[in-house]
Amino acid sequence: MMGPTYHVVGVPFRTGSLYPGSENDAQAYRDVQLVARLHDAGCGAVDEGDVRIPSFLPHHTVPPIRSWPGPRIAWECVSERIAPWLQQPGHVPLLIGCDCSIVVGTTQALMRAASDDLHVIYVDGDFDDAAPEPSRCRSAAASAVWLLTERSPFWAGPPLRRSQVTVIGWSTPSESGPSSRPSLSLAEVRDAGPREAARRALADIPASAAILLHFDVDVVRRQEMPAAYFPHGDGLSLREAAQLLGVLLKDPRIRIVEVSEYASLRDLDQRHVDALVALLVEGFKC
């Protein structure tokens, strides 16, 4: 087989998000044969099981970050698990079943493998840059981009420069005010066309950079992806998302792919995860 080998890894504990009860969302991807379908598409893929994350992590609503320090423990577990593949060219971790905050752990792993020559493409219906506040409890997922790019005691860091994170597809704007981070809103993606928007985002990233691609399923509109953890009334169609991913996923600089915020409890017949896997397989197709 030509192209990279994808190491499919489940993240079984959604400690960075809102509610317990969605701890095994990765299994739904397996139930609809993600790895077999990748093989059928000509891609190398191996199911590596789930990251081992302690089962006793807290669930609470104490400000500023819900269930802290659970998210950081999960990030460390994920970072350690995927690190060996990042040392091998052509081997790409593909994370499933995670919440958006996991990007902090995967960025940490990629930073250790690629020094500071890395870039995060953050495809999401939200900007996810809410700053933690001592008077309000937020999920780590809602602060994921802020955590990546601002110095704080919440992870080992050092933070990325804002220019190292591109947010694509957002319909809910930044909560931190005007941002110097590169971004393409949902409207801008539609105006340019998803393929051209993806090409523009990639063209602005240094040729030597290692890229982490984060894809939150809530970038797809509720009508077509109601099984998102926080579905959005407006968003990309599945067809538009396929066009966007079809360009992004084929970039040879991609070193990590993570698919976040799918809620299996909202998809009991697995119809929507089946559509999601079809979307991914088409994008990965070699």
Image (tube, grey):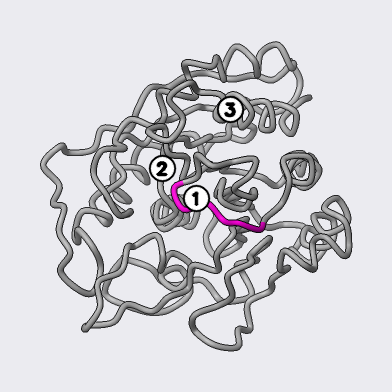
Real-space Cα separation, disc 2 to disc 1, in angstroms: 21 Å
Lateral position of residue 249 relative to residue 89, left or right = right
Question: Label 2: few (<14), some or many (≥20) within 10 Å?
Answer: many
**Residue found at x 56% / y 45%:** 217
Real-space Cα separation, disc 1 to disc 3, in angstroms: 17 Å
In this view, 58 is above or below 282: below
Q: Start and end of the magenta stretch?
A: 229-234
In this view, 178 is above or below 109: below
Lateral position of residue 180 relative to residue 22, left or right = right
Closer to the camera: disc 3 or disc 2?
Answer: 2
Kind of residue indicated by mark 1: Ala
In the rendered image, which residue does mark 2 sit on?
98
In the rendered image, which residue does mark 3 sit on?
6
In the picture, the disc for residue 113 is: 1
**Residue found at x 55% / y 77%:** 174
Closer to the camera: disc 1 or disc 3?
Answer: 3
Give the percent coordinates (x, y) of residue 39.
66, 13
Q: Secondary structure at mark 3?
A: strand
Give the percent coordinates (x, y) of residue 163.
64, 75
Closer to the camera: disc 2 or disc 1?
Answer: 2
Residue 136, quarter of the rendered image? bottom left
Q: Are marks 2 and 1 in contact (CB under 8 Å)?
A: no
Tell which residue pokes out farthest to the bottom in this image.
178
The answer to which of 277 and 234 lies nearer the viewer is: 234
Lateral position of residue 59 relative to residue 170, left or right = left
Q: Secondary structure at mark 2?
A: strand
Q: Secondary structure at mark 1?
A: helix
**Mark toward the start of the polypeptide (1 vs 3):** 3
